[in-house]
Image: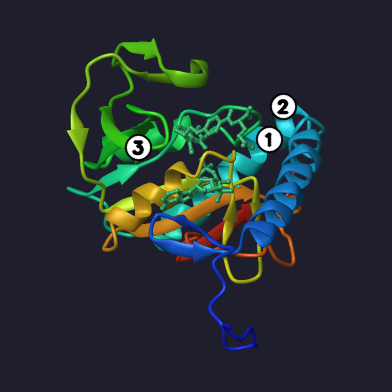
Amino acid sequence: MEQEDDSSPCFAHTLVDGHVVDPQTRHDVSVFRKSNRQRLYALRQKPTLEARQSAAKNIADQLGTILDDISGKTIAAYWPIRGELDLRPWMEKTVEQGAQIALPVVVEKNQPVEFHLWTPDCKMTIGNWRIPIPADAVAVTPDIIIVPLLGVDKEQHRLGNGGGYYDRTLAQLPSAMTIGVGQSFAKMDTIYPMPWDIPMQRIVLADT
Ligand SMILES: Nc1nc2c(c(=O)[nH]1)N(C=O)[C@@H](CNc1ccc(C(=O)N[C@@H](CCC(=O)O)C(=O)O)cc1)CN2
Ligand SMILES: Nc1ncnc2c1ncn2[C@@H]1O[C@H](COP(=O)(O)OP(=O)(O)OP(=O)(O)O)[C@@H](O)[C@H]1O
């Protein structure tokens, strides 16, 4: 008879993108993240428009310090949804300074996003989850990715909207510089990182 001991292989696992993940852990982490998303979405509703605009200006100033020479660079930003800080004034200024701005576009569910070129006067259309996207799809590869975050932990792992889109995308763009941006209340001790969670290289937060 076959003997069971501590060294016997355990088959109670699932594979996520080639990563071995214990299903109970995955479940617990998913429950934890869902409840934190609800908590943080609620916090995002609280600040006044003035407080958000001033926080967005603060973020823009910090980005200006981090990114000194952006001429010729392709920078992925985002069109604000669900109470994300509105960086569009910074995006416009960035284009004036000779950089290209692109926006994330979900072209297929559960696949990496594409980044499509955006200009201040470009025609927009509505994409998945009713997120505005450039009407003309010109896909580019960003040098720098400004990633909106809902939560962020001490190791700079990000909590997002729960689709896993940025993690899938960043896994394919290892040389891009990543800057997570959000509001100060986003700080968490840990998001209980899973093998697919890619930490941000820089974090820029502002009080609201
Ligand atoms: N401004 C902006 N644009 C973006 C992103 C973003 O975070 N911010 N994305 C960055 O990824 C992509 C959209 N990602 C999304 C991912 C999930 C859901 C969503 O609705 N998820 C479910 C919950 C999923 C779950 O918890 O299992 C929901 O809220 O009902 C929406 C958008 C592309 N564009
Ligand atoms: N690289 C990947 N390959 C396959 N699946 C992935 C990958 N990254 C994340 N996922 C899946 O996406 C799901 C959601 O991931 P996670 O909770 O990290 O989302 P998120 O970072 O908050 O979302 P988003 O980036 O869309 O804002 C996970 O349950 C995981 O199964």
Q: Is residue 59 left or right of residue 77?
A: right
Q: Is mark 2 on a helix, strand or loop?
A: helix
Q: Where does the C terminus fall, quadrant-wise?
A: top right
The residue wearing badge 1 is 52
Q: Nearer the viewer, residue 9 or 70?
A: 9
The reply to whether dot 3 and dot 2 touch (C-beta < 8 Å) is: no
Q: Mark 2 points at which residue?
A: 49
Q: Does any portion of residue 173 appear in the rendered image?
A: yes
Left or right of residue 74, residue 133 in this image: right
First in sequence, mark 3 or 1: give its number: 1
Q: Kindly indicate whether the residue at mark 2 contacts the one at mark 1 (C-beta within 8 angstroms).
A: yes
Percent coordinates x, y for residue 142 in the rendering? 26, 47
Q: Label 3: state its secondary structure.
A: loop
Residue 67 in view (yes/no): no
Disc 1 under 8 Å from ligand 1? The reply is no
Crowding around mark 1 (Cα neighbors within 10 Å: few <14, some 14 to 19, many 20+) is many
Q: Position of residue 104 (x, y in %)?
A: 37, 34
Q: Name the residue under label 3.
A: 113
- Residue 137 locus on image (x, y percent): 22, 22
Q: Is residue 182 left or right of residue 137?
A: right
CA distance separating discs 1 and 2: 5 Å
